[in-house]
Amino acid sequence: MSRNRPAPLPAGTPLGDYRIVRRLATGGFGIVYLALDAQGEPVAIKEYLPSALATRQPGERLPTVAPERLPLYRLGLRSFFEEGRSLAQISHASVVGVLNFFRDNDTVYMVMDYLEGASLQEFILTARQLKGRKVFRESTIRSLFDEVLRGLRIVHQHRMLHLDIKPANIFITDDDRAVLIDFGAAREVLAQEGDFIRPMHTPGFAAPEMHQRDAPLGPWTDTYSVGACIYACMQGQPPLDAPQRQQHDRLQPDLARLRGLYSDSLIDVVRWCMALEPTARPQSVFVLQKALAREGERRYTRPSVAERVRLRLDALGADRPGVGSRR
């Protein structure tokens, strides 16, 4: 089967009551288009088209799926359709609005609000280039993730999980709203059936259980990813991937570098969310919201001289002085 990504539908292609304007993005599990509805209003349309299972040649409308891949393709398609149906029942400013979903061209299309702005990932990259002492101010992080958690709490109340929370899937609109986009239910269903899907998890943001077949997933899976996103806003880069952490965990020394820049309570929230053991994390969004809202508990403990020396040695890759050392 071709390794090339499936070709997008060309501009002007009609899809039900919509007409494609252009491709907005291509991912491992589909293509997102800018389209116009019957009234000429812009919408975003996501097409289920996993590149590991299907291909499509330029100019064609129907995907080609190898016979041995067809059961898995249909399983993901059904999950994607059910995800659209569930999201259409949610109306919240911090969750992307699903306006419609329909079948066509042997696949499924999800019609969503068209958002203007940029992803949190783009903001992190821009802030990192400024080379300030802090990537984001703590007040900005707390305010941003208060909005994210409000939306995620509604999602969990509808017995759904996001399963792909990362800076690229937190969209900051031009009117300063934080919106959760691009849910990963179909991705996770396929991950349980085929190892070839596993690399689609974004390194650093997926909880350890998402790398294990048949491991139970729950709200704690999403809270891990929220903690990883907060970490990225503080460090300017993602944390180590969960399998790497299980071999050699660097989270504690990495968080120690942030002492004095961010409050102890915010650092503790990240440590709590990113516990490798699922039962050691926040078990609900509500308890995480309460912890993040504790503005009055901001203490800024600075690293001791010994800690600063150890951090400096770590940064240089040098051996640490130990017992019996002559250094």
Image (cartoon, helix red, strand yellow):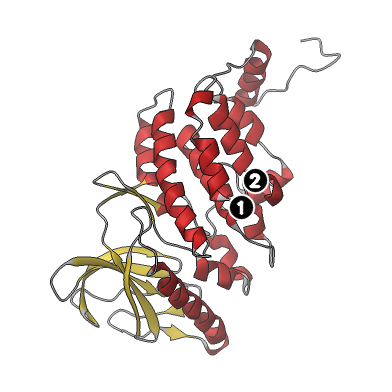
What amino acid does circle 1 point to? Answer: Trp
The disc labelled 2 sits on which kind of residue?
Arg
> How many C-alpha atoms fall within 10 Å of the one at disc 1: few (<14), some, or many (≥20)?
many
Q: Earlier in the sequence, mark 1 or mark 2?
A: 1
Residue 35, how many percent across, how many down?
A: 22, 70
Q: Residue furthest bottom?
A: 67
Residue at image point 66% right, 43% down: 275
Up/down of 156 relative to 21, above or below:
above
Callout 2 secondary element: loop
Residue beneath the point at 57% across and 71% down = 189
Residue at 61 percent of width and 19 percent of height: 312
Marks 1/2: CA–CA distance? 6 Å
Q: Residues within 10 Å of mark 2 (few under 14, many from 20)?
A: many
- In the image, 141 versus 156, the foreground residue is 156
Name the residue tied to disc 1: 220
Q: Please tell me the numbered disc located at residue 274.
A: none
Q: How many marks?
A: 2
* Image location (x, y in percent) of residue 161: 53, 61
Residue 83 in view in this figure: yes
Could you tell whether 292 is left or right of 279 in the image?
left
